[in-house]
Image (cartoon, helix red, strand yellow):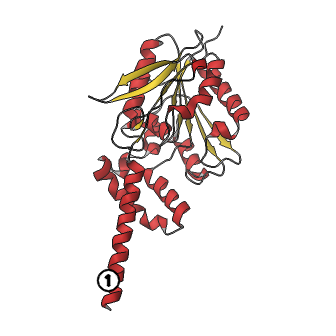
Amino acid sequence: MRRFSFAITIALLAFGLVIGVTGEVLSRPARCTIGEAPKELKARSVTLHTLPNESVSGWFIGGRPAHGAVLLLHAVRTDRRQMLDRVKFLNREGYSVLLIDLPAHGESTGNRITFGLREAEGVKAALRYMTQQLPDEKIAVIGVSLGAASFVFANAQQAPSAVVLESMYPTITEAIVNRLRLHIGQIGGYLAPLLLWQLQFRMGASPEQLQPITAIPSLHSPVLIASGSEDRHTTLSETLRLFQSANEPKELWIVEGAAHVDLYNFNPIAYESRISTFLAKYIRKAG
């Protein structure tokens, strides 16, 4: 009996350690040195101040007058380089583009990944910069996963003229449950509370604060919500709920066959066609 109790105790301690390590890995920063932008982009490096002693780094690429500007926001644990293919196609279309490293990513400061909550400060700084640099241009935002949530949480004072939200989770609870089930099976749903409990002491955030679906009704911009039909990180039903919560005008794009992947890389031709049409409709000036 003592051996059994001892074994159970060791198993529980080991399990607790695994959960603790998982929480640490999920929230630790993904900072790295990026270096110079590809020369063909003719990009200008920018450093934008957010909170005291905090800043985000990025690249700004000018476009043609009256064509509009686009802010690009990358996914979790990546950096601005994830968006380079989008930059090239958007700049060919004449758009000015700003791409940043979200807080705690790339060359931006930040001690914790907070799944969009504090990353929103970087989004605010980027939008301020674009408004100052391009006062006569309409501005759009394209956010991927973490980038999409970061934009929604930013609650921009001046709504962009168009917004694309790709593969965005509706609530942190669903995001964690889905990922645990993918990796360890149905039991993962029962273990999710142990990871959610860590949010408060690791990030100072509660699960109730990390719900893009409750923030999206405050967005009053034309919005395109996109996700893969085979995405198991943010399921089709979750994407449909996000779409239902958004204000008009809105569009839904379910990319057939795509999982939780970079939708541009999955089908560049379809992506460029759909996004070009959407942006031209709302941010390119006539004439």
Residue 271, given in percent of the width and then of the height, sits at: 68, 33
**Crowding at label 1, few (<14), some or many (≥20) Cα neighbours within 10 Å?**
few
Q: Which residue is mark 1?
A: 6
Q: Is residue 232 above or below residue 102?
A: below
Residue drawn at (68%, 41%) of the image:
266
- Which percent across, then down, holds residue 199? 34, 52
In the image, what residue occupies the spot 35% across and 65% down? Answer: 17
Q: Quadrant of the C terminus?
A: top right
Q: Quadrant of the N terminus?
A: bottom left
Element type where label 1 sits in the image: helix
Q: Position of residue 128 (x, y in %)?
A: 40, 20
Q: Hey, which quadrant is residue 120 in on the image?
A: top left
Find the residue positioned furthest to the bottom: 1
| Residue visible at 48% across and 37% down in the picture | 147
Q: How many marks?
A: 1
Relative height, residue 111 to residue 187 (above, below): above
Residue 156 showing in the rendered view: no
Q: Amino acid at mark 1?
A: Phe
Q: Is residue 227 above or below residue 73?
A: below
In this image, 49 relative to 179: left or right?
A: left
Asked if residue 191 shows in the view, the reply is yes
Residue 15 percent across, percent down from the top left: 38, 69
Farthest left residue in view = 52
Q: Nearer the viewer, residue 134 or 48?
A: 48
* Residue situated in front as seen by the camera: 109 or 35: 35
Residue 118 occupies quadrant: top left
Residue 81 vertical position relative to residue 47 in the rendered view, above or below: below
